[in-house]
Image (cartoon, helix red, strand yellow):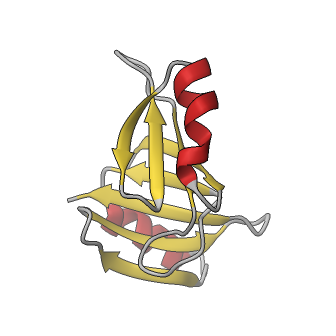
Amino acid sequence: MKVTRIVANLPAPDPALADPFYRDILGLHVAMDHGWIRTYAGDGEMTVQLSVASEGGSGTAVPDLSIEVDDLDEALRRVNRAGIPLAYGPASEAWGVRRFHVRDPLGRLVNILQHL
């Protein structure tokens, strides 16, 4: 298993309020917009992304980090082996990901996901 992407998630009552700064000033484009979440990304080879969300999807809290992996089952095995309790999932979501939430050792909510 390898990490393929890490996305920071920032809570906001209206994610579109971030457009003037992240899109207009910094030049990132909206790579995904579900209304409750907007993900900003760069062009070309840049893999940095920033999501601004009013919820975490499916009624969950906004996670502090989203970490995309290429093998969610392996990530889940590692989490279970470490005795880390799941805060959500695993669940296959309507927007095309399978994911689960855990808290890191610092108490941060982490969304671990794989695109379907």
Q: Position of residue 110 (x, y in %)?
A: 59, 63
**Residue furthest toward the right?**
106
Q: Is residue 77 left or right of residue 6?
A: left
Q: Is residue 9 left or right of residue 113?
A: right
Q: How many marks?
A: 0
Up the image or down, 12 lies above or below 78; here it is above
Q: Position of residue 6 (x, y in %)?
A: 51, 44
Up the image or down, 48 lies above or below 14; here it is above
Q: Is residue 35 left or right of residue 115?
A: right
Residue 52 is at least partly visible in this image: no
Residue displayed at 52% across by 45% down = 7
Residue displayed at 54% across by 69% down = 55
Q: Position of residue 59 (x, y in %)?
A: 48, 81
**Residue furthest toward the top?**
44
Give the quadrant of the C terminus.
bottom left
Q: Position of residue 31 (x, y in %)?
A: 36, 37
From the viewer's side, name the closer residue of 34 and 113.
34
Residue 106 is at least partly visible in this image: yes
Up the image or down, 98 lies above or below 31; here it is below
Residue displayed at 34% across by 63% down = 72
Q: Quadrant of residue 105?
A: bottom right
Residue displayed at 26% across by 63% down = 95
Q: Quadrant of residue 71?
A: bottom left
From the viewer's side, name the closer residue of 93 and 84.
93
